[in-house]
Image: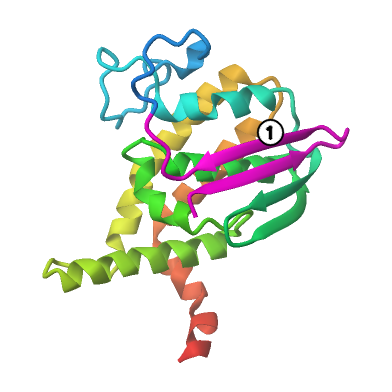
């Protein structure tokens, strides 16, 4: 599975299609494209932990990838209902959701599979994308993927993190990225669908950063069923 397609049907019948190639090439080299809005410039609300220098790169790699979608839904409210189909190579998903939830799922896929070295730490999750995932589902996939990566490190003779401390570190890094991306989105939006979609990532990062152990503990009754 390399390309995931989102088809979003508005209340008035308009249909929008977005194809996301998980292994797409980086667009960091687009230095003089006049089609990119000002808020996509790297120096506009640049993340404090951004590894790039604005003297070397003109655009934020995440911003230019979501700019088209952000523009398309700039005047859309969070509560507008929408029918969403998500097609992968292996299966299709359908759900009638509010626009905030639809955009959160689409933004999350693009952000995790893009060239930002901080967000791309979640790229393994993009390869097993689950649209409209709940917090519990997200944590389950996150922990499972992380432990699988630690198992690989262990087999390679390297030190493994079985206590999941690395997950908290990842989300500590993600939080300012999501926050500053939302500041960019505020410039481009007149309604709140885009803004609230990004806000949800900030909320999740805050929850995970406070301690993944507490979240996993709440899942123990479910996980013990398989023992």
Residue interval drawn in magenta? 1-26
Name the side, left or right, on which 29 lies relative to 12: left
Does the stretch in magenta take in 106? no
Q: Is residue 192 above or below residue 212?
A: above
**Going by the picture, which residue comes out furthest to the bottom?**
227
Q: Is residue 32 left or right of residue 198?
A: left
Q: Is residue 128 left or right of residue 97?
A: left
The answer to if 19 sits in the magenta stretch is yes
The spot of residue 4 in percent (x, y) is 57, 48
Q: Relative to 65, does residue 100 appear above or below in the rendering?
A: below
Q: Residue at x 18, y 71 (%)?
A: 154
Q: Report whether residue 139 is seen.
A: yes
Mark 1 neighbour density, 10 Å: few (under 14) some (14–19) many (20 or more):
many
Give coordinates of residue 97: x percent, y percent: 76, 49
In the rendered view, would you say 197 is above or below 152? above
Q: Position of residue 155 (x, y in %)?
A: 18, 73
Location of the C terminus (image quadrant): bottom left
Rendered image coloring scheme: rainbow
Q: Which quarter of the picture shows residue 193?
A: top right
Residue at the location (46% across, 55% down)? Answer: 127
In the rendered image, which residue does mark 1 sit on?
Answer: 193
Give the total number of marks visible in the rendering.
Answer: 1
**Residue at left offset 48%, top offset 49%:** 2
The local secondary structure at tag 1 comes to helix
- Residue at the right extreme? 12
Q: Nearer the viewer, residue 183 or 146?
A: 146
Q: Name the residue nearer the viewer: 91 or 46.
A: 91
Q: Is residue 105 visible?
A: no
In the current view of this chain or complex, which residue is farthest to the front?
Answer: 89
Q: x and y percent of residue 105 in the render?
A: 60, 47
């Amino acid at each position: 599975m390399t390309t995931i397609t989102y088809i979003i049907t508005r209340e008035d019948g308009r249909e929008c299609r977005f194809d996301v190639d998980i292994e797409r090439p980086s667009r960091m080299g687009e230095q003089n494209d006049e089609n990119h809005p000002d808020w996509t410039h790297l120096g506009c609300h640049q993340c404090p932990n951004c590894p790039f220098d604005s003297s070397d790169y003109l655009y934020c790699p995440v911003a230019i990838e979501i700019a088209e979608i952000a523009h398309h839904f700039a005047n859309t409210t969070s509560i507008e209902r929408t029918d969403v189909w998500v097609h992968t190579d292996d299966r299709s998903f359908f759900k009638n959701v509010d626009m905030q939830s639809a955009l959160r799922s689409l933004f999350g896929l693009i952000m995790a599979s893009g060239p930002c070295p901080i967000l791309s730490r979640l790229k393994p999750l993009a390869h097993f994308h689950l649209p409209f995932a709940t917090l519990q589902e997200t944590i389950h996939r996150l922990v499972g993927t992380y432990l699988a990566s630690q198992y690989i490190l262990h087999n390679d003779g390297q030190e493994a993190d079985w206590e999941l401390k690395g997950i908290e570190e990842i989300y500590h890094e993600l939080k300012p990225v999501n926050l500053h991306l939302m500041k960019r989105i505020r410039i481009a939006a007149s309604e709140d669908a885009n803004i609230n979609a990004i806000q949800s990532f900030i909320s999740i990062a805050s929850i995970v950063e406070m301690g993944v152990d507490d979240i996993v503990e709440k899942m123990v009754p479910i996980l013990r069923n398989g023992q």
